[in-house]
Image (cartoon, rainbow, N blue to C red):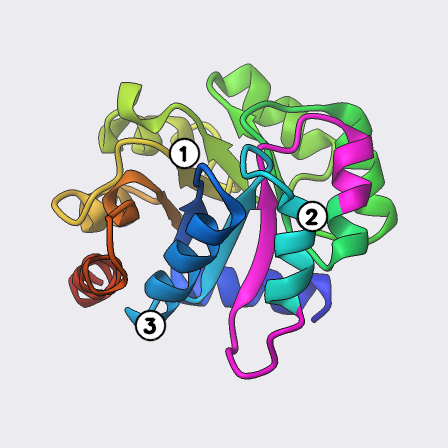
Amino acid sequence: MNKIHTLQKLEKEKLVAVIRGETSEEAQKISEGAYAGGIKIMEITYTVPNASQLIEKLSADQERDWVIGAGTVLDEVTARMAILAGAEFIVAPNFNLDVAKLCNRYQIPYIPGCYTVNEVVQAMEAGADIIKIFPGNTISPAGIKAIKGPLPQANIMPSGGVSADNLNEWLEKGAVAVSIGGSLYKENFEDIKAAAEELVQKL
């Protein structure tokens, strides 16, 4: 999938599942449960043990029409590892110019974490197509609208603090997509699937 198609899929689906776990197996279970519930965009974070191997494994799964990306990518070395493993987008909690350049070089969407208008502008100038507002739980949905006042061209994706209860409010205030994490972290597959289904139905 090329960069344009990845961005189009992300904008269409709206929901990005942020996958964490104490083991690779746990992270895979959350990914598969989220997909079973209707979420098709997975962000495998580099806090997961053996994240590159998991990205490679999930990317090779031809039975699911999901998009696998990498999260918590703090430097260009990790970004390159993720891309080689098959990641179709790169997400970070911060903005890093070297990561932006690398992702532009290989035409992989880079979604850096920003908090201020100055950071958002800096990331857009470096070629970031979507800006992750992080931590989202310290900025209300109205904060997205405020950012888009002077920056209507900014594609904003909040991460942190997004739930089934406020999902549509974020989107109504101008978010192009949202990141969902904690809502999906359940003990068993069926509960993960049910949580994902609730989010998808809210859309």
Foreground pick, 17 / 175: 17
Spot occupied by residue 129 in the image (x, y as percentages of width and height): 62, 45
Spot occupied by residue 74 in the image (x, y as percentages of width and height): 67, 26
User: How far apart are labels 3 and 1 at the CA level?
Assistant: 34 Å
Q: Tell us which disc is closer to us: 3 or 1.
A: 3
Element on which disc 2 rests: helix
Residue 173 is left or right of residue 123, and the answer is left
Element on which disc 1 rests: helix
Q: Earlier in the sequence, mark 3 or mark 2?
A: 3
Q: Is residue 62 magenta?
A: yes
Which residue in the protein does label 3 denote? 36
Amino acid type for the residue under numbered disc 3: Ala
Spot occupied by residue 178 in the image (x, y as percentages of width and height): 37, 47
Q: Is residue 201 magenta?
A: no
Mark linked to residue 16: none
Element on which disc 3 rests: helix
Amino acid type for the residue under numbered disc 1: Lys
The reply to whether discs 1 and 2 touch (Cβ–Cβ < 8 Å) is no
User: How far apart are labels 1 and 2 at the CA level?
Assistant: 35 Å
Residue under the image location 31 percent in, 33 percent down: 145
What span is in magenta?
A: 60-81
In the rendered image of this protein, does residue 98 appear above or below residue 40?
Answer: above
Which residue in the protein does label 2 denote? 52
User: How far apart are labels 3 and 2 at the CA level?
Assistant: 22 Å
